[in-house]
Amino acid sequence: MVDYPGPFVWYELITTDMAAAKAFYSEVVGWGVQDASTPGLSYALFTAGTAPVIGLMELPEEARNRGATPRWAGYVGVADIDATAERIKRLGGAVYVPPTDTNIGRISIVADPQTAAFALVEGLKPALRQTVAMGEPGHVGWHELLAANWETAFEFYGELFGWQKAAAETGSAGTYQSFSAGEQTIGAMVTKRPMQPVPAWLYYINVGDIDAAAERVKAAGGHIFEGPLELSEGGSILRCADPQGATFALQGKRSQDGVGWSAEWGGFSSRGKLVNRSRGTA
C-alpha cells in the first residue's frame, strides 16, 4: 500500500561553509537569503522573490567524521512518515536518520536499495510550502535519479510513492524514463554512466539565461561538468558543482546560437531530447 503519489516538497543544501554557499548561490541563481536559525541550529532560507525555496544548513561534524560531503537533499512529502520509513526498510532501502521532529517538520533521511539518498517530510511548515509551478525561475524544476539500474529503482519508488511512468526516451546507453507524481511529470530515472561513482538524485534549478548562468558558475568558483546542452523543447541544461563540492544542475534558455556538443550526452539524452545545432549558416 502506497502512502500517496508524493511530490518533492522541500530541498536543502547541506554544506561545510554556509557563508560561502550563500555568496555562491546568490550570485549564480539570484536567490535572496533569510536567517531562520533556531536555538542550537544555524539555518538559512534561500528565497526566490519573497518565497522560501531552499533550506541551508551546516553538515554536522558527526557526519563529516563518517566521510559525508556537501550535498543537496530533496524531501518527498508523505502523510505518515513513520509508516513510510518502515516500508522503505521492508523494500530493501535504508533509514539513516529515523523520523525526527525538526524546524521544518517531521523528517527522515533515507536511501533506496541502490543507496541513492533522499529525505521524507511530514507536516512541512506552512511557510515553506511551494505554491508556484515547477517552471518558475529560482525554483527546482526537475528531479533526476542516476540509478545503478533504473528499472529496479522505479519498482521501488512506484511501490513506495505511487509514482507512474510517463514518456520515455531510448538512446545508445539505455532508457531515460520520465515519471509523474499524481498528474504532473516531475522527473526521470536513468541508469548512470560508469564514470558516476554512486547512485544519486540530481536537482535542476530554473534560471533565465543558461549561458550567463554558466559564466556566473565559473566566476563564483564553481565547476561545470557538462553543458550547456540543448533540449529539443528549447531549453538547455548544465551539470555543476559548487565550491564546496555539492552537485547540482541548472536549466534555462540559451542566449548563444548553437551548442557545439553531440546530440547525445554520454549515450543518453539526459533531461529530455538534446539537439545539436551547428553554429552559423548551414
Image: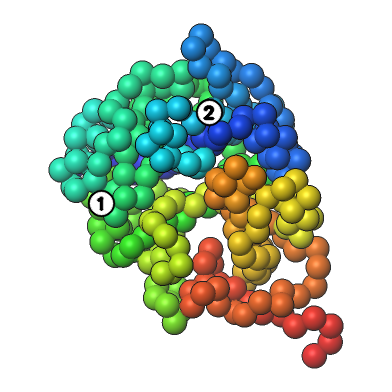
Residue nearer the viewer, 213 or 135: 213
- Identity of the residue drawn at 60% across and 42% down: 244
Is residue 244 visible to us here? yes
- The correct choice, above or below, for 89 with respect to 145 in the image is above
Kind of residue sitting beneath label 1 = Pro
- The correct choice, above or below, for 162 with respect to 35 in the image is below
Q: Quadrant of residue 19?
A: top right
Residue pushed farthest right? 280
So how many labels did they put on this image?
Answer: 2
Q: Is residue 141 left or right of residue 221?
A: left
Residue on which the image places disc 2: 58
Locate residue 191, reporting x and y percent: 38, 66
Q: Quadrant of residue 229?
A: bottom right
Q: Earlier in the sequence, mark 1 or mark 2?
A: 2
C-alpha distance separating marks 1 and 2: 26 Å
Q: Is residue 281 left or right of residue 273?
A: right
Residue pushed farthest front? 65
Give the image's coloring scheme: rainbow
Q: Is residue 44 left or right of residue 121?
A: right
Residue nearer the viewer, 29 or 39: 39
For mark 2, does the 10 Å Cα neighbourhood hold few (<14), some (14 to 19), or many (20 or more) residues?
some
Label 2 residue SS: strand
Residue on which the image places disc 1: 113
For mark 1, does the 10 Å Cα neighbourhood hold few (<14), some (14 to 19), or many (20 or more) residues?
some
Residue nearer the viewer, 63 or 210: 63
Locate residue 173, reporting x and y percent: 42, 77
Kind of residue sitting beneath label 2 = Glu
- Identity of the residue drawn at 62% across and 29% down: 18
Q: Quadrant of residue 161?
A: top left
User: Of tags 1 and 2, which is closer to the observer?
Assistant: 2
Image quadrant holding the N terminus, namely top left
Image quadrant holding the C terminus, namely bottom right
